[in-house]
Image (cartoon, rainbow, N blue to C red):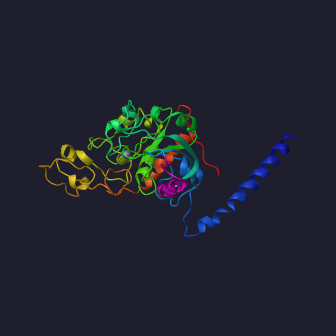
Amino acid sequence: MSRAAIFLPLVLVAASLSGCLGIQPDDEGMDGVEACDEQQYWHQISAENPYPGLNCEAPGPSKTLAVNFFVYKNKNGEDWLANETTLDTGIELINSVYNPSGIHFARANIVYVDMIFPNVTDEYQSAPIDNRTNESKADDGDNVAIGQLGDGFIEGYEPTMVNIVLMSDGWGAYSLYPWHPRDHYVNFVRAATFATSHIPSHELGHFLGLYHTHQYYDSLDSDSDLDRASSYWADDWVIPDAQCYRTGDFICGTPYDCYRWCEEVLGCNASDLYEGEKPGQQPSEAPQCTEEQHNPSLTNLMSRYGDRSEITDDQGARARYFVQFMIDNDRNGNHLVLYES
Ligand SMILES: [Zn+2]
């Protein structure tokens, strides 16, 4: 009796599985490339492949994150800092960077906060130093504090979504890493360039756990930077086989980048690479770095040079790792939930 009772459900499961598998040959048939499944693309990591989906020949299933936008009034209070077209165009640009890695962003909500965005010169205690990634062009004092954003922000904040605040000019864009304990994880970007700049994609890179390409630049000969990272996020990670996944920005696809500190680390000068980015740089006596000494990507999204716009496959895989991290973990009441249209 009991055997028969167990047998029937098994048959049903087998039938539904084969029905699923029946769809697969079309995907594989194209040029013999087998797409990874959700488990392989988003979850499985090993010492050899420390981020999920690194060995996938074709992208696996994508995931869509809901974006909650905050839009404030402009300086004279007559108009909003951004409209739907601005936001949608900007999201399209962001998606052009992240879609190849299976990560999509969708505009889920706009919170119109009926107040003029605070002026840069307004007196207010700035956010604590570890609460931000110190974006270029912004002095340490130029980060807007949560308390400046008004009750409309607190009420409109969505702990299950990606929250993006559109700022007025003058403020420097910045974002929060997913592993720091915070009540509010916010991406701050400028409204005026949201639709045309890769800075929002760069900020979302930090939100998705990507470091600058010059992270831990000072330990060139170090075997591992994991000790310095472990108190934040690496405790539950694997210890990767490859050194380039244990040092610097923990990405193998981004060549070493000494950025502003090449003289002290390498003894050569690479200031020509960021001349436009860091005006006022002192002339250097050190010889110019050769390509063998220093050849960082100038176009990588997480670099600090001018033309950043791309991420490598392993940066995309690391971003997937932290998307899943934010889905799986409750962080001070923040718990990412996938977007359903
Ligand atoms: Zn940055």
Quarter residue 222 falls in: top left
Q: Position of residue 251 (x, y in %)?
A: 39, 49
Q: Is residue 91 magenta?
A: yes
Taking the image in four quarters, ligand 1 sits in the one at top left
Q: Residue 134 or 19: which is nearer the viewer?
A: 134
Q: Position of residue 182 (x, y in %)?
A: 48, 32
Residue, x 73% and y 59% (percent of image)?
A: 19
Q: Is 192 on the left or on the right of 326, as rendered?
A: left
Q: Where is 81 relative to 329, above or below?
A: below
Residue furthest right in the image: 1
For the record, the magenta segment spans 78-95
Looking at the image, how many numbered discs can be counted on the residues?
0
**Majority secondary structure of the magenta segment?**
helix
Q: Is residue 258 visible?
A: no
Q: Quadrant of the N terminus?
A: top right
Q: Is 15 on the left or on the right of 243, as rendered?
A: right
Q: Is residue 229 magenta?
A: no
Q: Position of residue 67 (x, y in %)?
A: 55, 47
Q: Residue 224 or 298: which is nearer the viewer?
A: 298
Q: Is residue 276 visible?
A: yes
Q: Residue 25 or 2: which is nearer the viewer?
A: 25
